[in-house]
Image (tube, grey):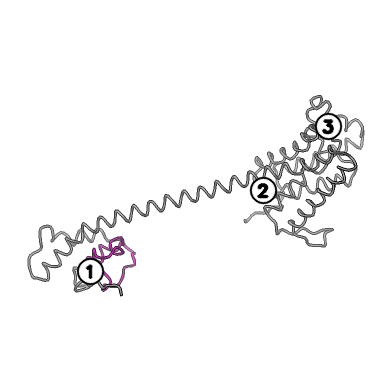
Amino acid sequence: MNRDLFGQKLGLTLPLCGFHFVFFFLSVMDPAKTRALFGFFPETPFANPWGFVTYQFLHAGPLGLFFGAFMLWMLGSALEAEWGTGPYAVFWLVATLGGSLSAWAVGTPLLGDPFVVPISMLFAFAYLFPDTQFLIFFVIPVKVKWLAWLSAFLLVAAFVVDLTTRGVGTALVRIVGASAGFVWFWVREQGRFKARKAAREAVTAVKTAQAVREDTSLERRNRELFPKVEALRSAQKAGLPPPSGGAELPAHLQKLVVPGVNICKPVDFKGDKDLVCLRCEGFAECSLRYLAGKPDEIVVRKRE
């Protein structure tokens, strides 16, 4: 792939990162009002329906803002470059709604980013580019697939902790929300893989069928042609006049010659006694050579 996965994009990722900063500054000015307006509340979800999406832009502090925006930029840019803006937008929306819909189902409010979208992005990125290395603390190189496994372990650990301390609600939101985007991506990727495989098999089948038809057609033509060649050759050897239509046969054979065909040695020409010769595009050229006395006669050797 000759593309810069981490180059600057003018698609969806940059505006989404900008929203994180905008909502953070709103929260700094009035935290309670910002959470009340843009958080997700399962008791009244349609009072502020944008809360199904905007909850993920809320952060408890600068550290959450940094990691949320940084992971979105780093992973989102690469995924948007790989998929295109349209499929990437659907992925982002599925991951986002995975968190809010699961919170709605279990009655858990969302007043901050539970990192469901970045974790979904991390899993998808690790699936596509498992050996890409990130620098932890800008020093330690680690392949992204190991970061994904570590995140999965921490997700399960957080699920157990939430289950025992906060109840099933928070635990379920983390698991469902973080998994929704990746599951959608994985199903889509498998479907595309199977579709590509079926398309390749179909193309191969069509090419094979076409090759068989061409071989059959070529064999039929050469079987009808060679008795005329043999009759003209016999007349030449006996010093007799060409049979009916025999005088025009060399010119007809010359029209059937396919330039560039790698033909065998003259002694290997077997006429209509060998299926390989009959299905060869060089049959007309070998027939002309046979009429010229090369080979002097056709010899079919029996297999030992």
Q: Give the magenta-colored segment's residue range.
A: 259-287
Q: Position of residue 280 (x, y in %)?
A: 31, 62
Name the amino acid type tagged 1.
Arg
Q: Position of residue 207 (x, y in %)?
A: 41, 52
Give the residue at mark 1.
289
Magenta span contains residue 266: yes
Name the amino acid type tagged 2.
Ala
Q: Which of disc 1 and disc 3 is earlier in sequence? A: 3
Residue 264 relative to residue 132: left or right = left
Name the amino acid type tagged 3.
Gly
Quadrant of res 235: bottom left
Q: Residue at x 69, y 52 (%)?
A: 127
Query: On residue 107, which mark appears?
Result: 3
Q: Secondary structure at mark 2?
A: helix
Q: Is residue 45 above or below residue 19?
A: above
Residue 161 relative to residue 129: left or right = right
Give the residue at mark 2.
81
Q: Position of residue 197 (x, y in %)?
A: 53, 50
CA gap, disc 1 to disc 2?
60 Å
Which quarter shows the C terminus? bottom left
**Dot 3 crowding, Cα within 10 Å, few <14, some 14–19, many 20+:** some
Quadrant of res 222: bottom left
Q: Residue at x 33, y 54 (%)?
A: 214
